[in-house]
């Protein structure tokens, strides 16, 4: 059985909470793996050796970098879960502007006292190779179980390549652009069941930019529909601020 | 002098290390080093549009995200002068209580119980075979909380539907009414939970900290009310929170420490039950009394039992809110509002205690300043004061037992360190 460790970097623990939120499957999943370390759920120490590392959170400290390098040397399989780990997510918003100004904004002049070894936030993939990705903010528990099974069985990673507009049409949602409102579904990875859009909220891009997204075409559509192009780019930063190609 | 450290304390949300300096068998100092990485949320909302603040600040905490989202919405609405409908308020209260069900059940069964059941078992997982009915009960309450959250907000973590002025979508009355029988079952499960928690052997411990909680004359205060101090006897408007809570940066923690009137203080289930005992659902009061709990209690370890009492209350209250929702009429769809400059603050009682958000907005709706004080950040100074008072009383125990007792005290606060740093 695969020996699994779960690690949290800079995050809100929401994706680890989602792992506990698969109540109906939790005990089955635990029966299919050997859970060696999970700080959130169990006492114990990080073992020397393991097969699979599940990593949540963005990289924000030197300690994270060192930890990830050790993880990559040890684990045969690394799974990044959630936007923070996959794209840098919300923590990467701190990339804009000067980091020390931000520390000053929160901690005042005493900022130097805290947060030793801090570095600019980045996704896990910026430090080490990642074998499997579970995207979203937060992850969907069912999607997590599916990717974990893929990892254990040695199947390939299967992050959807296409943006979500096609699935949105199948869900019979009214397009936000028909109302002149910006929606990131144009360029964001499909696979969430267009959850937000179906509930009356435009997509904010938490699953990251789809590999097949055509940004130039998306911009043309936004302009043609009379929506706010600046807002599209600004919204795209929310979860993709670690990408250099969007600014 | 020797130093004992417990790194990355397990079964709490976030990363913290306990450091104890021991000299000749005596505890010289004990600290909670909050090593949770800084994410600088208060700086992140600056420059973003006002309606993104709830989305961004919800990501402070994946375990109580509905509470952050709703509190941030209240701050935005206060800044823009928006009043929400009674229907919206009911849906928000339901959402906050659904979060209580999920949070308290997770803390009591997954985080706290392994310290007390079966002589200390490290995690809840062994109970799946040794006490399956207990695990099934835990999962039932947690799942109900998650499914009610999902029905209201689209998913159990990071709510989708709550927006400035109301909800982008609301569940059909029939969908909510289908929860009522399950809530009745949850109230019974919560009663059994309280009975279980009452069997946890806890020390007699009477620390000296102040206790703060929101108090509302009409209701058990979680959505609105003023903030009241138990010892000092004052009640203050939420919007004045910066004037009665003093935050200081301390060297060993990435989270700031807080005091009121120069004293550390506690927030959470125990201060709430102490101050709003008369407004608890009658069943919750009856069960608590039968189990020997009487307000006012100063024993921090009673926070666990008070969470269980609140679980009973939450289950009953949700059923009553669903009944009110079916009758209330009106709309939760936001009404049109004008974007203008202003500042506002909001507070709610999150599962771990009073949560404050505030922000300032300019004429274009861009956030110019933001501030958040989370329950755990407020509790940290008090937690350390408790540790200093408690550690000498258990210092003679063998090291593993000593560490377990200290960890029990830490977990009694149900700390959320990623919240505390944000």
Image (cartoon, coloured by chain):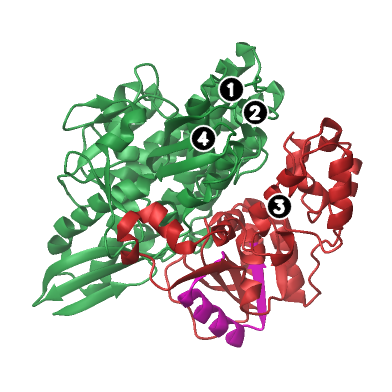
Chain identity of mark 3? A
- Colour assigned to chain B in the rendering is green
Query: Residue beneath label 2, please?
Result: B167
Q: Determine which residue is flagged by label 3.
A: A236
Judge if badges 3 and 2 mark residues of a common chain. Answer: no
Q: Is residue B388 left or right of residue A218?
A: left
| Mark 4 or 3: the one toward you | 4
The image quarter in which residue B333 lies: top right
Q: Which mark is residue B88?
A: 1
Res. B290 in view: no
Q: Nearer the viewer, mark 3 or mark 2?
A: 3
Q: Pointer 1 and pointer 3: residues touching (CB < 8 Å)?
A: no
Residue A53 is one of the magenta-drawn residues: no
Work out how far the residue at label 1 is from the one at label 3, CA to CA, in angstroms: 29 Å
Q: Distance of mark 3 from mark 2, alpha carbons?
A: 23 Å
Q: Are marks 1 and 2 in contact (CB under 8 Å)?
A: yes
Which is nearer the N-term, disc 1 or disc 4? 1
Discs 1/3, front:
3
- Tell me which residue sits at (73%, 73%) in the image: A151
State the extent of the magenta-drawn residues as a range: A57-81
The answer to whether mark 1 and mark 4 are in CB contact below 8 A is no
The residue that disc 4 covers is B361
Seen in the image, is A71 located left or right of residue A190?
left
Name the mark on residue A30.
none
Secondary element at tag 4:
strand
């Amino acid at each position: 059985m695969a020996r699994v460790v779960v690690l949290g970097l800079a995050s809100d623990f929401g994706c680890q909470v989602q792992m506990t939120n698969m109540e109906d499957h939790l005990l089955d999943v635990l029966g299919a793996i050997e859970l060696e370390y999970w700080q959130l759920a169990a006492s114990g120490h990080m073992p020397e050796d393991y097969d699979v590392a599940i990593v949540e959170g963005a990289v924000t400290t030197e300690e994270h970098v060192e930890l990830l390098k050790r993880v990559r040397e040890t684990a045969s399989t690394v799974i990044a879960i959630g936007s923070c780990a996959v794209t840098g997510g919300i923590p990467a918003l701190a990339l804009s502007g000067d980091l020390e100004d931000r520390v000053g904004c929160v901690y005042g002049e005493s900022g130097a006292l805290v947060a030793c070894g801090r570095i600019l936030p980045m996704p896990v993939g910026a430090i080490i190779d990642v074998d499997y990705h579970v995207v979203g903010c937060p992850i969907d528990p069912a999607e997590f179980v599916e990717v974990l099974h893929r990892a254990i069985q040695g199947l390939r990673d299967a992050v959807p390549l296409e943006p979500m507009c096609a699935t949105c049409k199948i869900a019979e949602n009214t397009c936000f652009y028909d109302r002149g409102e910006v929606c990131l579904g144009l360029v964001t990875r499909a696979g969430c069941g267009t959850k937000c859009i179906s509930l009356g909220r435009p997509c904010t891009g938490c699953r990251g930019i789809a590999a097949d997204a055509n940004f130039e075409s998306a911009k043309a559509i936004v302009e043609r529909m009379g929506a706010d192009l600046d807002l599209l780019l600004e919204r795209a930063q929310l979860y993709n601020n670690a990408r250099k190609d969007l600014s | 002098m020797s130093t004992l450290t417990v790194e990355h304390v397990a079964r709490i949300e976030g990363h913290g290390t306990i450091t104890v300096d021991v000299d000749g068998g005596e505890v010289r100092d004990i600290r909670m080093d909050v090593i949770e990485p800084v994410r600088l949320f208060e700086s992140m909302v600056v420059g973003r549009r006002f309606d993104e603040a709830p989305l961004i600040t919800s990501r402070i905490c994946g375990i109580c995200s509905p509470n952050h989202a709703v509190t941030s919405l209240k701050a935005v609405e206060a800044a823009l002068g928006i009043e929400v409908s009674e229907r919206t308020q009911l849906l928000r209260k339901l959402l906050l209580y659904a979060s209580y069900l999920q949070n308290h059940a997770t803390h009591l069964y997954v985080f706290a119980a392994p310290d007390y059941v079966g002589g200390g078992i490290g995690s809840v997982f062994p109970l799946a075979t040794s006490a399956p009915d207990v695990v099934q009960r835990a999962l039932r309450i947690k799942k109900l909380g998650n499914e009610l959250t999902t029905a209201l907000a689209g998913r159990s973590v990071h709510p989708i539907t709550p927006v400035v002025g109301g909800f982008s979508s609301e569940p059909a009355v029939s969908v909510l009414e289908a929860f009522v029988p399950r809530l009745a079952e949850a109230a019974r499960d919560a009663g059994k939970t309280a009975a279980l928690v009452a069997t946890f052997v806890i020390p007699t411990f009477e620390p000296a900290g102040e206790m703060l909680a929101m108090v509302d004359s009409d209701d058990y205060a979680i959505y609105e009310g003023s903030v009241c101090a138990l010892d000092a006897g004052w009640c203050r408007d939420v919007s004045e929170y910066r004037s009665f809570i003093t935050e200081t940066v301390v060297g060993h923690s990435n989270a700031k420490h807080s005091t009121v009137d120069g004293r550390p203080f506690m927030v959470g289930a125990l201060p709430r039950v102490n101050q709003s005992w008369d407004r608890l659902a009658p069943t919750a009061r009856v069960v608590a009394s039968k189990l020997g709990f009487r307000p006012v209690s100063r024993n921090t370890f009673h926070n666990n039992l008070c969470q269980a009492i609140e679980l009973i209350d939450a289950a009953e209250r949700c059923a009553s809110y669903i009944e009110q929702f079916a009758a209330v009429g009106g709309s939760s769809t936001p009404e049109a509002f004008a974007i203008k400059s202003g500042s506002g603050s909001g507070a709610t009682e999150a599962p771990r205690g009073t949560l404050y958000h505030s922000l300032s907005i300019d004429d274009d709706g861009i956030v110019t300043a933001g501030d958040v004080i989370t329950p755990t950040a407020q509790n940290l100074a008090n937690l350390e004061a408790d540790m200093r008072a408690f550690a000498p009383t258990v210092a003679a125990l063998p090291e593993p037992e000593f560490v377990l007792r200290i960890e029990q005290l830490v977990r009694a606060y149900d700390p959320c360190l990623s919240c505390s740093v944000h």
